[in-house]
Amino acid sequence: MQAFVRVDAQNDRIELQEVPIPELDKDEVLVKVQAFGVGIHDRYFIPANVRFPYPIGTEAAGIITKTGGEVSDFQAGDRIILSSSLQPKGGCWAQYVAVSSDMLIPLPDTLDFILGAAIPVAGKTAVECMQALGLKEGETLFVAGASGAIGTLIIQMAKNQGIRVIGSASSKNHKYMLSLGAEKAVDYSTPDWKGHVKRWIPGGTDAALAIQPGTGKDSMDVVKDGGKVITVSGDRVGPERSITVQQFQHQLDIRHTIRNLADDISRGKIRLEIERIYPFKQALEALTKTETRHARGKLVVAVAGS
C-alpha cells in the first residue's frame, strides 16, 4: 500500500512510500481509509521504539475490510470513524490502517467520509475543553485562535449552551466566526484588542481558552479576577489575580465523546467547517498549510482513488 511515512526518528521529513499492509491482531480491524484529517502534530506524533518507515496520522474515516478473531461489535463493510494516535503499527495517512476495535465508532449514514475524518481530534478536544471550562448559561468565554478547527466547534458548543463568546482571529475570519455564534470578534494584530474585550465585558470574561501558542498570557489579561484559563496551546503561565490556570489534557476514551458529536453534526446542531479537501498525493501540502496555524476550520485528505 501507499503511505506517508516518517523515515527515521531523527529526521521529521515525511515521504510517500510503498509499505506492507499491516497484519491484524485478534482485537483489531483492517480499515480501507477513505479520508483522513490533517492535524498540527501529525508529523511529530511518533511512539517510542517503532520500526521505520512509520506511517503517520491520527484520525480517519473508512470501511472495514477484515476483522480479527476477537472482534464482535464490527464487521467487514461497516463505515467507521477512527482514531489511530501513537499506534506502534502506524497511523492512518495510508491506504489501509490496522486499529483496535475500541478506537472505532460507526459513521452516521447522513455523514460522508470527509466529514467523518474531520471529527476525532478537533471534536474530542473541543468537547473536553467545554467540560473542563465548566461554564454555565449566561457566562462569558474568550477564545484565542477561534477560527481554527477547535475554535469553530467551541463557538458553536458554547452558543448551544447559552454561553456568550468573544473570539480572536485575523479580521478576514470575523464574519465567519460571527456566523457560527460568536457575539464579538477581535483582531489580535490590533494594538488595543484587549481593550475591546474589556469594553464588551467590563472586568473581563469568566473564562478563556488559549488555543494558539503564545496566547496564554494574553488570555490571562482579559479574564476577570477569580476566572479560569485553559491552555490547549501548551503555554505555561503562572496564576495571578486568583485566576485558575489549567493545562488541557486529553482523556483516554474517545468513543462516547465522538459518537455524540457525530450525531450532533449529522442532525445539523453543529456545523463542521472544511476549508479544503486535498487529493491523496497532495497530503504534504495540506500538512504544511496546517502547520502555519492559519487554516480556517479543518483540512481533510481524500484517499479514495489514490
Image (spheres, rainbow, N blue to C red):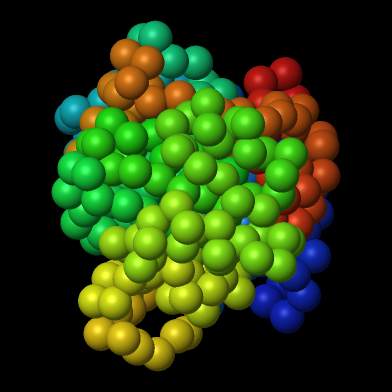
Viewer-nearest residue: 170 or 72: 170
Q: In the displayed structure, does residue 77 sit left or right of residue 145?
A: left
Q: Is residue 228 above or below residue 107?
A: below
Quarter where residue 68 is shown? top left
Residue 115 in percent (x, y) is at 51, 25
Towards the viewer: 224 or 110:
224
Indicate whether 30 appears above or below 210: above
Q: Quadrant of the C terminus?
A: top right
Q: Position of residue 292 (x, y in %)?
A: 75, 57
In the rendered view, would you say 272 is above or below 2? above
Q: Is residue 204 left or right of residue 286?
A: left
Q: Where residue 207 sits: x, y (%)?
A: 33, 63
Q: Is residue 264 visible?
A: yes
Q: Residue at x 24, y 60 (%)?
A: 132
Residue 137: percent from left, percent from top: 19, 42
Give the total of numbered labels. Answer: 0
Q: Nearer the viewer, residue 288 or 188?
A: 188
**Residue 206 horizontal side relative to residue 219, left or right:** left
Q: Residue 185 appears in which quarter of the rendering?
A: top right
Residue at position x 33%, y 71% from top?
224
Could you tell me which quadrant the N terminus lies in? Answer: top right
Give the residue at x 71% y 44%: 171
| In the image: residue 235, left or right of residue 158 | right
Image height of 124 relative to 196, above or below: above
Q: In the current view of this chain or complex, which residue is farthest to the top? A: 110
User: Which residue is found at the position 71% from the left and 49% from the top?
Assistant: 170
